[in-house]
Image (cartoon, rainbow, N blue to C red):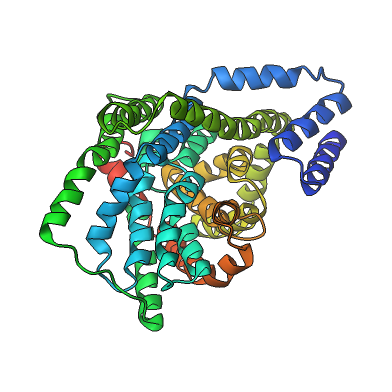
Amino acid sequence: MSDALIWMLVALAITTAMGFPVGLSLFGSGILYFILTGQDPSLAGELILHGLFASFMLLAVPLFVLAARLMNDGGITERLLQLCIVLVGRHRGGLAQVNVLTALVFSSMSGSATAEAAGTGRMLIRMMTSSGAYSRGFAAAITSASATIGPVFPPSILMVLYALASSTSVGGLFMAGVLPGILMAGMMMLMVAWIARRRNYPTIERPPAAEVFRVIRRAILPLLMPVIMLGGIYTGVFTPTEAAAAACAYALILAVLIYRILGFKDIVDALVESARITATVACVFFGAFVFSYILTVERIPMAIAAFLDGKDITANMFLFAVNILFLLLASVMDEAAMILVVIPLLMPTVMALGIDPIHFGLIVTFNATIGLITPPYGMVLFVVSGVNKIPVRDILAEIWPFIGILLVTLVIVTYVPWLSLALPTYFGFVR
């Protein structure tokens, strides 16, 4: 490790601690490295352009963000929410169960935990608290926890980033997330049922059959969106990026031509807001491109692989250490930056130990999602708190049981690789 790299890491730590955006901290510390090593700082710009032009799949990120916004504004989310109420609302703690099921359904269209928390979360929290049966803290906690299904169940923006950092099949990763995503939802629904029984939460009256059929009929067209996206990917009709574009087009058709909810101004507002979110994520991309180049020049991945090669370490021991590392990093670091920066360091060891990169991708994604609701960073916690004006301390008081059940699920996903690899193997993504 050279002196220039040490100074770069010091600058990164200081700027991050001062509250600078992670992407700008990565980019600025990379410029410092180039200056200290006598290289042209404009190399940073060249690396960014090369990374962008070489990564067609990055276009999927803004498209998934836009698709989620169009679904929220275009009435699609509300129709899916009513369907979930009909399906599970009659159970004890019904609205909390609806929260989890809605997250599972919405995650098959948005790929983002923050989009899910900000979109359906606001409606669900208002529904849960309006009757006074649920505390604002509990409603926000279950909303935050269920939003973590988004990055695990396909399609997933984090999986796109992992595929970029590890040269892994996006389609295989999407397929691998199906069973773990369903398991997450099932475990959280069990936790809700346990809490609801202890606190005697209410149920929702079963609707008449005519109402059930009406709600199902209204939800048929929105439910076709994940069928179009994922079916197109798995049959080879779409690439993941093209599937994201198809999702945007389908959401526009529903919201503008069929439901007639969105007008020109609404579409412009959705484009502007999606551009803002994408710009924030893009800054992380730019910094990560520069940072990864520097680590490669310094031969850090090879040094880590050589160090571990001399140790008597098994794949299970390595996965345990990785879980601890990523849980710690995810609680203090942006999940996109974590994946783009750390994954290239670990992939040589992953391959050397015979760990399937698709299974490893699910483990990494799962850790990153838990970090979204873990203090002090916990981005989803702050999104839910800000959108609903609920203090973070109230959410934290209720969220620990859900973090605990997610950790149990993480252990299962880590040490039962069949969950992640059964579907990718069946569909030919794993040989």
Q: Residue 233: x percent and y percent?
A: 31, 31
Above or below residue 299? Residue 13 is: below
Above or below residue 319? Residue 290 is: above
User: Residue 321 sits in which quadrant?
Assistant: bottom right
Q: Is residue 287 visible?
A: yes
Q: Is residue 313 visible?
A: no
Q: Residue 129: x percent and y percent?
A: 44, 66
The residue at 59%/51% (across/down) is: 379
Left or right of 55? Residue 90 is left
The residue at 63%/40% (across/down) is: 337
Q: Residue 55: x percent and y percent?
A: 52, 23
Q: Quadrant location of the C terminus? A: top left
User: Residue 85 sits in which quadrant?
Assistant: bottom left
Left or right of 240? Residue 18 is right
Depth check: give the residue in front, 62 or 394.
394
The residue at 77%/46% (across/down) is: 19
Q: Residue 317: x percent and y percent?
A: 54, 60
